[in-house]
Image (cartoon, helix red, strand yellow):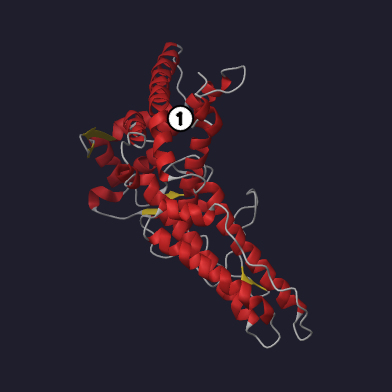
Amino acid sequence: MECFAFGKTDEGLGELIQKLYEMAMSNPFPEEWLEKCLDEYRVESLEELRQTEWMKLLWSAVLDELKEAELLVQEARRICEEADGPYLYEEALNSDLLLIRRVKEAAEKKEYNEMAGLLRKPAFARLSTKKAPDVEEQKKQRVKELREEEKGILKELGQRYFQGTEEEILEILQYTKAPVEMLVELTIRFKEQFGDAKREKNILDFTDMEHFALQILMTKEGEELHMSQAARELSARYDEVLVDEYQDSNYVQELLTTGVSGWINQRKNIFMVGDVKQSIYVSAWRDRSFLWKSIKAIRQKKVRNRGLTFTKISEAGRRCWRVSILFSGRSWERTLGESVMTGMRLFIRELFFRRGNRRSL
């Protein structure tokens, strides 16, 4: 019980089961999804660890962040090189650029322990405090802002992902495999018993209706999906299928939409409107890749403000991300990487033993 709930109550376990149940039911085949979750913990060697899906996603996300940090430094250097720019700051910026490139080389080689050594406590050179009378104050402040943003990226990478070593991660995964297997087993039992209770009372919830609709439209044999006669009739009926707030769809709803679309006549007649940056599932679901599988290009509306292009992503978000015109910024794919890694961090925080507790066992 101590693996799942800290303190004097076991409420934490119930919350974990509920959360995992909701995640599983957002997938067309919940039991299969739960079984695949366990594969991430069945790691016996460092080589297997390096081949896990989440480790591959980690490197992709890290390289994106480093690209952003590098572009921020380059923009700051460009301002310094202007006639009235804060040229005395160039030395510190050049030092930052060397650090970023060293980290980037380690990331490209997928050297986790080297990355941890560089990012756990990154050393930044101080900006020059010398007075330069010919420097425009606004440009000076802008360079400071850009540098603080760049430093924040590097510090956050170290704090989030590189506080340990590969060997420690492997040890944690092996140590937590049994508790996670038990959590999955309890979730499956909860799903079965909850289903029995609803049938006894002749009750359906929205999730039930989704899955029953899916059973009407298709069956699965092995890895293949077979559409039913009902799906064929519905596919031929609709000229267009319009979906709003598409970012809040899950895999069940994606298959339902596909099942009633024009596949029977080989027509692509689904029109979707959505913004993954506003997804209600941003920190919950593992993979949102279906959201842009048919998207070829995204055009952002740009607003000029002191040399920076920015876009308000979400009024409800914890911050308004600023997107530079120099790079693609918080694109759909970039946001996916963040949502996946956020979900992984939340899951690890709740399931992994605290290092101090683990070492005391």
Residue 151: image location, x then y, percent: 61, 61
**Is any atom of residue 170 visible in this view?**
yes
Q: Residue at x 31, y 47 (%)?
A: 51
Label 1: how many Cα within 10 Å (few below 14, some 14–19, many 20+): many
Q: Which residue is mark 1?
A: 20
Residue 259: quarter of image: top left
Residue 289: image location, x then y, percent: 39, 50
Residue 256: image location, x then y, percent: 36, 40
Q: Residue at x 24, y 53 (%)?
A: 266
For numbered disc 1, what is the local secondary structure?
helix
Closest to the observer, 324 or 70:
70
Say above or below: 352 vs 123.
above
Q: Residue at x 67, y 72 (%)?
A: 143
Say above or below: 278 vs 92.
above
Say above or below: 320 vs 249.
below
- Check disc 1 and give the amino acid type: Leu
Q: Residue at x 61, y 64 (%)?
A: 124
Closest to the observer, 274 or 24:
24
Closest to the observer, 21 or 275:
21
Residue 43: quarter of image: top left
**Is any atom of residue 245 visible in this view?**
no
Report the label total: 1
In this image, 30 relative to 137: left or right?
left
In this image, 296 relative to 18: left or right?
left
Residue 240: image location, x then y, percent: 37, 52
Residue 186: quarter of image: top left
In this image, 341 relative to 47: left or right?
right
